[in-house]
Image (cartoon, grey):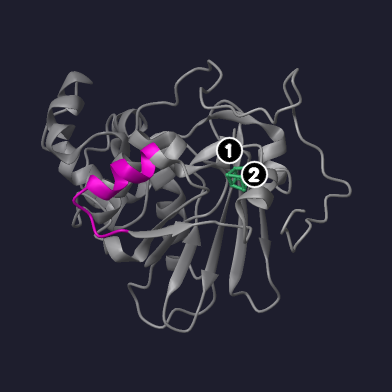
Amino acid sequence: MSNRQVKPKTEGWTQKKDESGKPLLQFAEPKRGKPPLHLADIEPADRGATVKDLGIEAFRAKQLATHYFTHYTSDPEKMTDLPKAGREELVGKVLPRVLTEVKRLQTDDGKTIKFLWRLFDGALVESVLMRYTNRITLCISSQAGCGMNCPFCATGQAGLVRNMSAGEIVDQIVRANEIIAAGGLGKSKHEDERVNNIVFMGMGEPLANYNKVMSAIRTMVEPQPNGLGMSARNITVSTVGLVPGILKLADEDLPLTFALSLHAPDDELRDDLIPVNS
Ligand code: SF4
């Protein structure tokens, strides 16, 4: 007799299965075009050389980083320290708009905003901005869709569209900071209020996009103006349990916060709810 105590309510759930009836897991992303190169895709030490390859003087990399990571803008009109002639083209090469806002839903008290973003290739992702008493949290996506096929999750049922680039992951935070600075999350308590808590609990399984997620995290913790200067402890990587990724993460020299979504009190039920468990 099974000692299972809890049965999931599975009515209405659907799940993609293979020929033998096992839930399909999708680790490899379908082939799609690459997002445009963005400053946040490039390690700080390599930025000077990379912008030089694009025909831009190396010292401009720091000016652009200051605008983006400190003033949260990609708007050439606001970058008056750059020469007016050719400014738009220069900014477009290094800080292309990688997220287009499609929809914004805000709670009546103004303290929570859900964003729907379109990526360059039409893929859609979400992020959620939440004001609490002592922090501002942003729940971010790491993949468009997800290949983990958890039957209770609408994202999982759509399958994996593609991995997000580091620039796309970071831009969710910069765009949120831009909106906070413009008063979009209600009255600020102080002038330089911004997102100070990140949870990777939006679309996607972050450890299935390990390299891009870690590159984005390194930019988040890099001091301003080359990064967002966030505390690693305030960045939570949440996983359904990809063991090789967990082991790699443990070896990183970063005091990140880690969350494992169990979803079930025993292995048998977890096999149903989180197919990668088996
Ligand atoms: S890993 Fe997360 S995003 Fe992916 S299907 Fe499962 S619950 Fe949904």
Identify the image quadrant of the C terminus: top right
What's the residue at 74%, 63% (across, down)? 5
Helix, strand, or loop for circle 1?
loop
Q: In the drawing, does residue 166 fall left or right of residue 228?
A: right
Q: In the drawing, does residue 220 fall left or right of residue 49?
A: right
Q: Which mark is residue 278?
A: 1
Q: In the drawing, does residue 57 fall left or right of residue 126?
A: left
First in residue order: circle 1 vs circle 2: 2
Q: Is residue 207 magenta?
A: no
What's the residue at 37%, 31% (across, down)? 92
Question: What secondary structure characterizes most of the magenta part?
Answer: helix
The reply to whether the C-beta atoms of the residues labelled 1 and 2 are less than 8 Å apart is yes
In the displayed structure, 15 sits above or below 55; it is below
Percent position (x, y) of residue 219? Answer: 27, 47
Real-space Cα separation, disc 1 to disc 2, in angstroms:
6 Å
Q: Is residue 248 magenta?
A: yes
Percent position (x, y) of residue 260? Answer: 48, 56
**Badge 2: few (under 14), some or many (20 or more) residues near its Cα, within 10 Å?**
some
Q: Which mark is residue 271?
A: 2
**Amino acid type at image mark 1:** Ser
Residue 88 in sight from this viewpoint: yes
What's the residue at 28%, 56% (across, down)? 228
Residue 80 in sight from this viewpoint: no
**Amino acid type at image mark 2:** Asp
Span colored in magenta: 244-256
In which quarter of the view is residue 185 placed? bottom right
